[in-house]
């Protein structure tokens, strides 16, 4: 890592080492455990990450705690100037972040670049925090004789975010900009599988020269996470990941008196009606299911054709799946990259085989895909299962791989029953040109994010990211107004003045 004095306007290479960033300095990680960071397309070891031990976590928390009072006293107008500078630093580094992201995760460069744009979008939204704080307050004059009452938003202290492997550049920026713009200090704990893009993001933070201790980076595994969850000086925790871990985060952090927003897993359905424009809809569905190798919580991996549309839908989907190219995300013609680990690929293969045993038809089989140039990659070819039913595991459990489950419904009511049959409520999409169908779907489907002719219904930064049922634990979501509410509390002040002097 370069020092502040040596930092260039833009990073020039993918990092080959992983360090913590605490108190405005890059520091060697103290801890006994760790693991390699592996390129999932090539099997190449890119770096090694050491897991921060509890003492290292405590040092970071204390540093952030000490920085809080001065940062809280800094005007919101001044705080957001750092975000304006951070936006530019991220813009300057976006290609380097994309390269690191593709190498450590496997997604295509196009997907990586799009992810970074969505992260920068949240920096832009958070830069409007002075106005968002004003809108969240209120004043009432004359609530009683000579008495006025008003609410003031105040920051709470040190917040942390524990982020997943699938969007390591975007998801930290769901949280970091809002936390610091509202006057809190912040600690990021990225996924240990993909820490390299965070290193470059924090090079940008270093170049902005935030006051020491305001923004910190701590790398680690499960013990690092638990040390953050249980630390007395952490005010709140944000998390994105699987539902079992989200529930653990929620319960542990809440038990220790913290605010929690924990985004869990998903099982999303796309429904296609006879009114849909298939020529436009099918490529959108393909992108939702197979993009990012299916490793996203907004993937609509169960597709339901309603009534007479099913046969045409099936034919067009099969044609498009046949055109997908699997490979290294750095190669320009790649559509589907590798899965994050070999274990992940084996888990997905097991789910495919279980579905076949339960009665599904395996129409497109990607289990035996081998790339001639990358024999050590964690590749799985696009796969399509047909004639699935809602009592199968493949339609109820998040698969996180390039697999589509295709089925049919007699009418929209039956399709909505299928959508609502899972324990999750993250997202769902409807493809139609019928406004009444769209309204019915939005009204009856129990999901936090609804797409109408949109397969990846990821909200813009000025809206919160929804999620219900087993997909979310907490009360306030990431992004937008919910983020402001999560990172602040309202103090109610009641004033009475007896004298006119």
Image: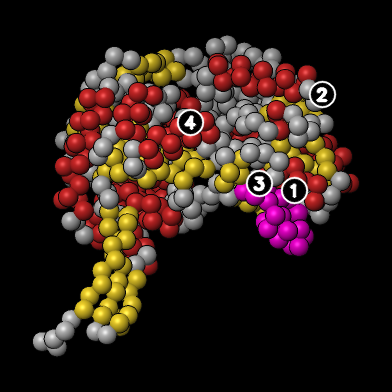
Instruction: Using a 10 Å C-alpha cutoff, classify the residue at mark 1 as few (fewer than 14 neighbours), some (14 to 19) or many (20 or more).
Output: many
Query: How far is the residue under mark 4 from the one under mark 3?
Result: 23 Å
Q: Identify the magenta region.
A: 428-447
Q: Which residue is mark 4?
A: 245
Nearer to us in this view, 226 or 133: 226
Mark with earlier residue (1, 2): 2
**Label 1 – label 4 distance at C-alpha:** 28 Å
Q: Which residue is mark 2?
A: 359
Q: Nearer the viewer, mark 2 or mark 3?
A: 2
Q: Position of residue 67 (x, y in %)?
A: 18, 44
Q: Nearer the viewer, mark 1 or mark 3?
A: 1
The residue at the far left in this view is 501
Residue at the farthest bottom position: 500
Q: Are marks 1 and 2 in contact (CB under 8 Å)?
A: no
Q: Kindly identify which residue carries mark 3.
A: 428
Marks 1/2: CA–CA distance: 22 Å
Q: Earlier in the sequence, mark 4 or mark 3?
A: 4
Label 2 to label 3: alpha-carbon separation:
25 Å
Q: How many marks?
A: 4
User: Disc 1 on helix, strand or loop?
Assistant: helix
Q: Which mark is residue 416?
A: 1
Confirm or deny contact between disc 1 and disc 3 (CB under 8 A).
no
Q: Is residue 202 above or below residue 143?
A: above
């Amino acid at each position: 890592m370069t020092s502040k004095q040596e930092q260039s306007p833009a990073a020039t290479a993918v990092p080959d080492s992983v360090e913590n960033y605490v108190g405005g300095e890059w520091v060697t990680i103290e801890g006994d455990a760790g693991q390699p960071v592996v390129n999932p397309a090539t099997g190449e070891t890119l770096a090694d990450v050491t897991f921060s031990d509890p003492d290292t976590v405590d040092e970071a928390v204390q540093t952030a705690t000490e920085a809080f009072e001065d940062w809280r006293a800094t005007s919101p107008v001044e705080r957001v100037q750092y975000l304006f500078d951070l936006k530019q630093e991220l813009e300057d580094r976006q290609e380097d972040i994309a390269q690191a992201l593709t190498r450590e995760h496997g997604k295509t460069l196009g997907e990586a670049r799009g992810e970074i744009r969505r992260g920068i979008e949240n920096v832009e939204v958070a830069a409007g925090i002075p106005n968002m704080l004003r809108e969240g307050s209120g004043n009432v004059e004359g609530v009683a004789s000579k008495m006025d009452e008003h609410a003031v938003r105040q920051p709470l202290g040190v917040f942390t975010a524990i982020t997943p492997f699938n969007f390591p550049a975007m998801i930290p920026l769901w949280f970091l900009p809002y936390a610091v713009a509202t006057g809190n200090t912040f600690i990021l704990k990225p996924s240990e599988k993909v820490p390299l893009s965070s290193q470059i993001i924090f090079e940008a933070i270093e170049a902005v020269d935030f006051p020491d201790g305001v923004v910190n980076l701590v790398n680690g595994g499960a013990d690092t996470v638990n040390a953050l969850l249980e630390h007395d000086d952490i005010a709140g925790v944000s998390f994105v990941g699987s539902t079992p871990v989200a529930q653990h985060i929620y319960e542990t952090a809440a038990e220790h008196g913290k605010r929690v927003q924990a985004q869990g897993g998903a099982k999303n359905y796309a429904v296609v009606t006879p009114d849909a424009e298939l020529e436009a809809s099918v490529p959108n569905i393909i992108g939702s299911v197979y993009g990012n190798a299916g490793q996203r919580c907004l993937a609509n991996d169960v597709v339901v054709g309603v009534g007479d549309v099913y046969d045409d839908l099936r034919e067009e989907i099969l044609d498009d799946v046949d055109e997908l190219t699997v490979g290294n995300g750095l190669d320009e013609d790649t559509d589907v990259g590798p899965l994050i680990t070999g274990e992940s690929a084996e888990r997905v293969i097991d789910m495919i085989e279980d579905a076949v045993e339960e009665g599904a038809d395996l129409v497109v089989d990607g289990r035996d895909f081998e790339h001639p140039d990358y024999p050590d990659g964690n590749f799985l070819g696009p796969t399509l299962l047909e004639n699935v039913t809602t009592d199968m595991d493949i339609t109820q459990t998040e698969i996180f791989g390039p697999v589509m489950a295709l089925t049919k419904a007699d009418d929209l009511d039956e399709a909505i029953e299928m959508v609502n049959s899972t324990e999750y409520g993250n997202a769902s999409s409807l493809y139609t040109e019928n406004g009444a169908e769209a309204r019915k779907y939005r009204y009856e489907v129990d999901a936090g994010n609804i797409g109408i002719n949109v397969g990846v219904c990821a909200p813009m930064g000025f809206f919160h990211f929804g999620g219900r049922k087993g997909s979310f634990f907490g009360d306030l979501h990431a992004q937008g107004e919910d983020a402001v509410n999560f990172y602040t509390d309202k103090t109610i002040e009641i004033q009475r003045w007896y004298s006119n002097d």
